[in-house]
Image (cartoon, rainbow, N blue to C red):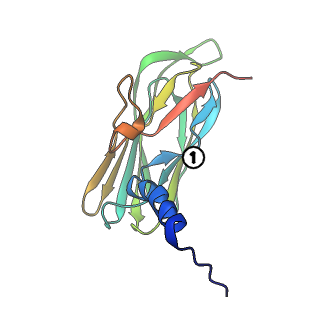
Amino acid sequence: MSVIRIGGAPALALLIACAPAVVHAHVTLESREAPAGSYHKVVLRVPHGCKGSPTLKVRVRVPDGVTGVKAQPKPGWELATVKGKLAKPVDDGHGGQITEGVNEVTWSGRLLDEHYDEFVMRVKLPDAPDAVLHWPVVQECEVGVHRWIEIPAPGKSADDYPEPAPALRLKARN
């Protein structure tokens, strides 16, 4: 087995460059862009627990305008959805309207702090190019909670907040 050693200024620069990624490990989306009006696989990445404590529950609020939510079950986890009236009716593509749907998805189980996992759902995105959809997530742990629910104010970015909501930018279809 070979060991590569990096010393001096280059190693320090690499350590400093990587430190913010470790310190600010957020719940994120696998894809940060998707075609407006498309069916999309939303993958939420959970990189850690709460200060060493295991994650027991991951709850995500579905953004307004998103329909057709189908959450993917995970072995060893319980899956629950909350349905309700949509903020605004959506065209179903067949001459009718969708007036209710899934507003929240919750996975309950156990994810150790030293492990990483992904939580998946298939959705129909609204046909709104250039819109940004925020997916607020509450991560409940054995001890503690992370509320990844902060939505940037105009002129701000997710980097300006300690617990930003994962975001998906909708782009025009080709």
Q: Where does the image place residue 164, in percent across and percent down from the top left?
A: 37, 40
Q: Quadrant of the N terminus?
A: bottom right
Q: Quadrant of residue 47?
A: bottom left
Residue 153 seen in the current view: yes
Q: Is residue 119 above or below residue 54?
A: above
Judge left or right: residue 95 versus residue 120: right
Q: Nearer the viewer, residue 23 or 9?
A: 9
Pointer 1: what residue? 30
How many marks can you see? 1
Q: Residue furthest top?
A: 95
Q: Nearer the viewer, residue 122 or 4?
A: 4
Q: Nearer the viewer, residue 35 or 41?
A: 35
At 67% from the left edge and 85% from the top edge, which residue is drawn? 2
Q: Quadrant of the C terminus?
A: top right
Q: Residues within 10 Å of mark 1 (few under 14, many from 20)?
A: some
Q: Residue furthest front?
A: 9
Judge left or right: residue 11 versus residue 113: right
Q: Nearer the viewer, residue 47 or 156?
A: 156
At 55% from the left edge and 29% from the top edge, which residue is drawn? 169
At 48% from the left edge and 29% from the top edge, which residue is drawn? 133
Q: Where does the image place residue 89, in percent across and percent down from the top left?
A: 47, 15
At 70% from the left edge and 23% from the top edge, which residue is drawn? 173
Q: Where does the image place residue 78, in percent across and percent down from the top left?
A: 43, 56
Q: Is residue 39 above or below residue 26?
A: above
Mark 1 residue type: Glu
Residue 116 seen in the current view: no
Q: Is residue 76 above or below residue 99?
A: below
Q: Residue furthest right?
A: 174
Q: Residue furthest bottom?
A: 1
Q: What secondary structure is found at the residue carrying circle 1?
A: loop
